[in-house]
Amino acid sequence: KHTHTQQTHTHTHTHGQHKALKLETESTTADNPACTHLNLCAILSRLDRHQHALQHCQCALELLERGEGAGGMTPGLMNDYQDEPESSILAVCYHNMAVEHEHLKHSDDALQCYFRSVEVAQAELGPDHVVTLAFERRAREAEANIEAKGRVTARGMKGSRMSEYDKKLVNATPSLKTAAGAKTRR
């Protein structure tokens, strides 16, 4: 019952965000369409609609790159002293893209986006900012997880489709070539 209620609220939020996005795209004075896309991404991700969530991240990124989506810093996210931003919408955008790529098992794209989120956070927020440090930690965790999964897949223990990373690993290690070849012959 609790899960059904959560899903109903999530679907309601999705509907509301789509309405907001429609209004913003029709308006000439909309100041936050990139954030609306990122909110939709978060909602769709919770519904396990990761491909659609990724598309909203990509739309947000395009808006931000064109300078049409809330500027570089996330509006309304300031600290108690109002002297520095608490977040960067562009860094959050790259981070969300990384998460969606990871859900979709796009390992290389996920890592690129994780590391890009760190670069942007460092540039906009500074290397010691809490958001920068959190994104760095998540990027390292993702890298370790993806590499561990790559080793398992290359050994033929899990999964049937090899990523480019797996293929490089197999080609670089002679003992893995025979294991991977044995798996494909089965």
Image (cartoon, rainbow, N blue to C red):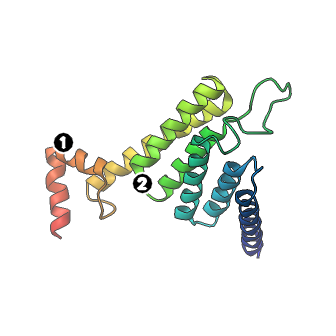
Near mark 2 (Cα within 10 A), the count class, few <14, some 14-19 or many ≥20, is: some
Near mark 1 (Cα within 10 A), the count class, few <14, some 14-19 or many ≥20, is: few
Q: Which residue is denoted by mark 1 in the rendering?
A: 172
Q: Secondary structure at mark 1?
A: helix
Above or below, comparing residue 97 to residue 46 in the picture? above
Quadrant of the image containing the C terminus: bottom left
User: Percent x, y for residue 156?
Assistant: 26, 59
Q: Which residue is denoted by mark 2 in the rendering?
A: 106
Q: Is residue 95 visible?
A: no
Above or below, comparing residue 156 to residue 126 in the picture? below
Instruction: Give the residue displayed 73% in from the left and 60% down from the top.
Output: 26
Where residue 42 sits, quadrant-wise, is bottom right
Q: Nearer the viewer, residue 44 or 3?
A: 44
Q: Earlier in the sequence, mark 1 or mark 2?
A: 2
Q: Amino acid at mark 2?
A: His
Q: Nearer the viewer, residue 120 or 2?
A: 120
Q: Nearer the viewer, residue 14 or 62?
A: 62
Q: Nearer the viewer, mark 1 or mark 2?
A: 2
User: Percent x, y for residue 109?
Assistant: 43, 48
Quadrant of the image containing the N terminus: bottom right
Q: Amino acid at mark 1?
A: Ala
Q: Is residue 184 visible?
A: yes
User: Percent x, y for residue 141?
Assistant: 50, 41
Instruction: Give the residue displayed 57% in from the left and 32% down from the top.
Output: 120
Q: Secondary structure at mark 2?
A: loop
Is residue 22 left or right of 123 when viewed as pictured? Answer: right
Where residue 86 sits, quadrant-wise, is top right
User: Percent x, y for residue 31?
Assistant: 75, 46
